[in-house]
Image (cartoon, helix red, strand yellow):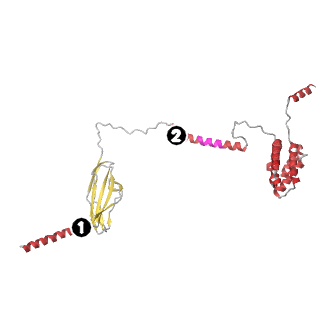
Amino acid sequence: MKMNRRIKILFFALALFSVNGTGVFAQKAVIKASIDSTQILIGEQTNIRLEIAADRNLHLQLPMPVDSIVNGIEVLNISGIDTTDIGNNRIQLKYDFLVTSFDSALYLMPPFMLIAETDTVYSEELALKVSTLPVDTESQKFYDIKDIAQPEFVFWDYAGYIIYPIIALLVIAVAVFIIYRLRTKKSLIPFKKEEPLLPPHIIAIKELDDIKLRKLWQQGRGKEYHSEITDTLRRYIEKRFLVPAMESTSGEILDKLKGISDTDFVCDKLKQILILSDFVKFAKYQPAPEENELSMMNAYLFVNGTKIEEIPITENTDIKDKKASDN
């Protein structure tokens, strides 16, 4: 009797070990699926959660749905993997699928498949019911689709199309005005009273006085000295005789002035100034002090000999003119 009882206990232990051993082997990888809500309205969202438990060293493959799980259930987002160590050299993996549906129906989702090396395991089947909003067709009235409504005119909605072109035109107008005033050598303030222009000979004499006071040739700046004298005379000739002297050569200036009777007796003095200046500027000629002084003296003589002076009208002049007319 005792022998039989021991045999039965041993047999039961072997059977239990065999069942447990088979269960451990079969439980190398398991997958479980669950859904947060089995009923949603059209357009609402719910989460499907996958939980996988497997040995750490197993190579797992889980085919992931990309756009939809079944026709009608769309996948909006797949979360990252949440990995947890559950001991005994095993890990737990979690995935979340955010899904929605826009068609009312009862959807049956097939099991999720997990490939664990040579084994394939499946999760439970899930169901999702998608319902529409209840509509009271008896108490609620339905209307036809309205035509597209025209929005009210609001000026500030179109202000940019009006203001910006006007500003651009104003900027262009101001730029053109400034360029014109600068080219014509006029004041940028249009309504500013312009100072009366001095006669050309007064301006020329003042410039010659300034050149003389600076003593350029005495400082070894002979080229600058003669250049400034000739530039002063060229500007004077342009205003006095209306000859484009600034753009003409020395020979061209002398030829244009030969036919003017006012310059016959001073042309030789101007010729001396222009020729000496050309030698200094282009031939690097070093004139003697007497030649430098002569150019300045001849410049004064040329301006004073060709100037036009206005005779001021005075009371005595008017009386003399009246007496002369009476006689």
Check disc 1: other Cα within 10 Å, few if <14, some if 14-19, many if 20+: few
Query: 60 above or below 311?
Result: below
Q: Is residue 205 visible?
A: yes
Dot 2 and dot 1 residues touching (CB under 8 Å): no
Name the secondary structure under disc 2. helix
Q: Mark 2 against mark 1, which lies toward the viewer?
A: 1
Q: Which residues are magenta?
A: 166-175
Residue 90 image-quadrant placement: bottom left
> Residue 79 got which mark?
none
| Residue 111 horizontal side relative to residue 13, left or right | right
What number of labels is visible? 2
The quadrant the N terminus occupies is bottom left
Where residue 193 appears, x then y in whole percent? Answer: 72, 36
| Left or right: where 165 falls relative to 39 | right
User: Which amino acid type is shown beneath numbered disc 1?
Assistant: Ala
Pick whichever, 154 or 276, lies toward us.
276
- Residue 194 appears at what percent x and percent y? 74, 37
How far apart, in angstroms, are the residues tagged by discs 2 and 1?
74 Å
Q: Residue at x 72, y 44 (%)?
A: 183
Q: Which residue is situated farthest in the left direction here? A: 1
Question: What number is the disc on residue 26?
Answer: 1
Residue 250 x/y as whole percent: 84, 52
Asked if residue 243 is among those painted magenta in the image, a careful observer would answer no
**Residue with the most extreme top position:** 326
Overall secondary structure of the magenta stretch? helix
Q: Position of residue 89 (x, y in %)?
A: 29, 67
Residue beneath disc 2: 158
Badge 2 or badge 1: first in the primary sequence: 1
Amino acid type indicated by mark 2: Tyr
Whether residue 242 is visible here, answered yes or no, is: no
